[in-house]
Image (cartoon, rainbow, N blue to C red):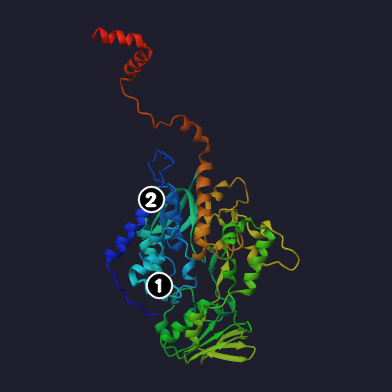
Amino acid sequence: MMMTTIDTSRMALDDLKQAALADLALLGYPNAPWLSELPRPDAVDVADVIIVGGGQSGVTIAAALKWDGLQHIRVLDSGAPGAEGPWLTFARMEELRTPKTQVGNEFNVANLSVRRWFETRYGHQAWADLSRIPRTDWKAYLDWYADVFEIAITNHCEVLDVAPQGDLIAVKTRIGGRIENSLARTVVLATGYDGAGAWRVPPFVSEALAPEKFDHTNGPVDFSALKGLRVGVLGHGASAFDNAIKALNAGAASVDLCFRRPRLPRTNPHRAIETPGMMTHYPDLSETTRWDIARFFRSADQPPPMRSFETAMKIENFRLRPATPWLEVVQQADAIHVTTPDGVLQFDHLLLATGMDVDLAVRPELSTLHDKVVLWGDRYTPQDGSADARLARFPYLDGFYGFVPKDPEDAWVSRVFAFNSSSFVSHGPHSTSISGHKHAVPRLVRGVLRRLLLDREAVILPELASYASPDLPIPDDFERVLAEANRQATRSPETDSQAIRSGS
């Protein structure tokens, strides 16, 4: 859908920003600071919260924590300024999958909503005509949103580890070749879809081909290099279709999209669980129910976006190949030979839309933490026939997205929160996605505030005893004023009458 910007001037969006801030002020934003400073002899700053990831989850969480009175919040992101999240990197769809009415990071403040932002930029009719929010507009909105809340992001920041340091947590980072440790009371990992592992290329591909012969669709792809080539895509989800379209638009000779299912999924089960009850109270469901829901989503999956499907099917050199698993991949002199049940397909380059491998150990930020947390395989024994090795590798998170320590002596682990794909089994298939923010972010924020409060329980009573904020103003000459008031109160009416007659 092509849209004409009616007013892209900074003034229009600045006016909207001021209107949003006025609304926030009417609702009590921000709350007064309530967390006392941590005096340190080394004068090192200690953050209340360090958020790893400056994408849609990171900025929404930072905004919510600021609203609840936290002042020392740091947001770290490995991307360049403006390139946080997947929206301008490996996300290649034209529009979001999430329905435009199910965005919930505006805290019920209309002037903070993506709808108001979109209408300000393109007009009311453009929003009415819109089926889904364009991907690049969503990113532009997130940048504006972060500006409203004055959320500063430390960019080009690679997080190398999260580990205990005394009563605090040290976040080891590398910025421009410089290694440093930043201290925090709590840490939130808002690291997105691959936060529980890494994008997976099947070994039968990576072990058979030179690295330049294939790419994972959720990584960098030089589409210009595909011009004139025969491209094979493995996978049937949104990423598979979006990358196929991108390759064909870049001049690929042909794209064959192959998948093992006999047909594409037709129904998106995510829509069925996007209810306030389910999204708000999901972790209160029994372990068996949550496990079985996760297994259902693994088997049912979801269809590609309608727009991506329709666009691909209209391109002449696109071929959809259901019931076509890849059994073997071999590099021959003339081409890559892919063996399928129906014969051999020949390609010049492969794109693998094969998702993520669940493996906490491959995440740099989890170098210290990965073997100290409880996994679902440690806590839950599936019923007969419902075992799933992949689901068993997900961490078993508490009701607030916090990691659970295997050893009680590693209590620091519970002050690290995983608001990413690690929550797939514990909190549902997409509680950390756009449509889940309205319900999931408040739960996470409650968990962070709860942890901060419990960590300082020993000082609550002494601080209460020393609290001094007079509600009753008392003048310096209070004793004289009090004596005069008491004297006036003890004078009888007869005394006053005599004083009047005598002229006193």
Whether residue 336 is visible, yes or no, is: no
Instruction: Count every numbered label the image shows and give the total.
Output: 2
Residue 421 vertical placement versus 398 (above, below):
below
| Image location of residue 263, percent across then percent down | 62, 84
Q: Which mark is residue 127?
A: 1
Q: Which mark is residue 448?
A: none
Q: Nearer the viewer, residue 69 or 411?
A: 69
| Drawn side of residue 350 relative to residue 15, left or right | right
| Drawn side of residue 80 relative to residue 207, left or right | left
Other-residue count near label 1 (Cα within 10 Å), few / some / many at <14 / 14–19 / ≥20? some
Q: Residue at x 63, y 51 (%)?
A: 406
The residue wearing badge 2 is: 26
Q: Nearer the viewer, residue 497 or 343?
A: 497
Q: Residue at x 37, y 71 (%)?
A: 124
Residue 9 vertical placement versus 451 (above, below):
below
| Secondary-structure class at tag 1 | helix
Residue 275 vertical placement versus 73 (above, below):
below
